[in-house]
Image (cartoon, rainbow, N blue to C red):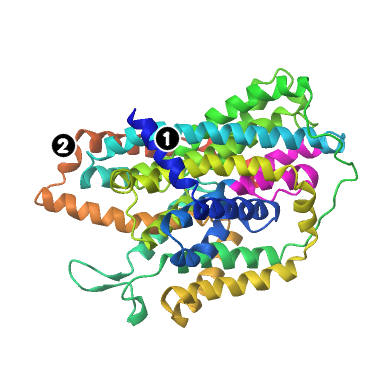
Amino acid sequence: MEFFDSLILGFSTAVTPTNLLFCLIGALLGTLIGVLPGIGPTATLAILLPITFFLPPLAALIMLAGIFYGAQYGGSTTAILVNLPGEASSVVTAIDGYQMAKQGRAGAALAIAALGSFFAGTVSTIGLAVAGPTLAGFALSFGPAEYFSLTIFGLLCATILASGSVIKAIGMIGIGLLLGWVGTDVNSGSERLTFGAVELFDGIEFVVIAVGLFGIAEIIVNLETPESRGLIATKITSLWPTRDDFRKAWPAVLRGTGLGTFLGILPGGGATLSAFSAYTLEKKVSRNPKEFGRGAIQGVAGPEAANNAGAQSSFIPLLTLGIPSNAVMAMLLGAMTIHGITPGPSVMHNQPDLFWGLIASMWIGNLMLLVINLPLIGLWVKLLTVPYRLLYPAILVFCCVGVYSVSNRAFDVALAVGFGFLGYLFRKAKCEPGPLLLGFVLGPLLETNLRRAMLISQGSPSVFIERPISLALLIASAALFVLLLVPAIRKTREEAFVEEEA
């Protein structure tokens, strides 16, 4: 009964005019970002973080969350119609979706993508509502030792699930940890890694790093990429799939939903990994794998369900444990911190309207996306005619104004630009910036809980193995590390990301 009372509280909070408006804004912005290649939800959230200063906390989180899962819907539209994925998680959708469009079945592909995404979003939202209270109650028993071990486990998962070289992923996490420790040590009062710069005594602002690494760096990378767009000549005659399309698609949707929900929860997982894994799974279980790449509707249904399920299940560890599972969740953690909200199990108990209101808004947002996406297909595709040379100057100005508004310091703007060029160099070196941001966010948490645990145990490290939960997490972390060193596992991991890099 208490569960249904909480859901009623969530929907009553989410359907207020202000929250509905920002849910719609987030859904529309997310779709727009998904349609336009080269921007992505991570960069968009980084750019919009300063705006959240002027919004109510729940409205800000609803809008930012809507941008994240809305981008998964928008990315499929141009992937299918133009063979131009607007979002990384839609790359595999383009493989079979564009072939279906060339065969005159674009409407069926778009409808299955939208319906599969809505179903997966609904299931993963229900999963969050059901699992949230249980995990939050479990997390209340966590002490400093458990949070330290959980952070170690999360960083190792992020290393394994990050695309590219393991060594590079570890290096990026190490850089993120160092950046997170810049500033004044709370215990000793001494400055660390400030190099005498007074502006760094309070540490580096989260917004500065986020906008630099994901906003400005994204602009530089895309400016050197030549524009190449071309719409297919086939007209969309019908949006309703045939009975045979439904028969083939729904098993793939169910598999994609389950796989995406699981991978989204894992630290380092999310929409992109879920989509690629779902496509691989569909080819493995298909009786006729040769049809993939030639217009197989399962190749659209599975990944589209998986990327939405992965996007929304990513909220589970953030809202219940306070641990971000990917770079986008780190952005949302930054937004919560800006508003003085401490993510974790205390949110559900201290601010139930915020927790349940955000969950309810996810289902409402998915319903909005289903309603607005298919009728507005022509408008979304038309937006691709806007030249990048007009978009990026405006985005760059917006980035700089947003960073300056945080602390009203020109130093922060210069620092963001510096991180922008650093992010560009990382991309040229094929170093994924996501682990760096996770390291930056989790570094202070790691240090704080390590110190607290050692103070409680009077300097004895045995506290980490005496507590069962902490010990289990450390054993799991050690097992992950050993698996990472096994040549066969390392080879399988590298092969899993070959298709993504292509």
Residue 133 point in image, percent of width and height:
34, 35
Q: Earlier in the sequence, mark 2 or mark 1?
A: 1
Q: Is residue 454 above or below residue 134?
A: below
Query: Amino acid under label 1?
Result: Ala
Can the viewer see residue 82? Answer: yes
Q: Which stretch appears magenta?
A: 70-99
Question: Which residue, given by chain and number where applicable, does mark 2 sit on?
Answer: 466
| Nearer the observer, 5 or 232 | 5
| Nearer the observer, 55 or 201 | 55
| Nearer the observer, 269 or 316 | 316
Residue 199 point in image, percent of width and height:
36, 79
Residue positioned most to the left:
458
Asked if the stretch drawn in magenta spans residue 194, the answer is: no
Query: Amino acid under label 2?
Result: Glu
Residue 316 point in image, percent of width and height:
42, 40
Q: Is residue 13 above or below residue 260?
A: below
Residue drawn at 49 percent across, 73 percent down: 403
Question: Which residue, given by chain and number where applicable, does mark 1 sit on?
Answer: 129
Task: Answer left or right for 119 relative to 355.
Answer: right
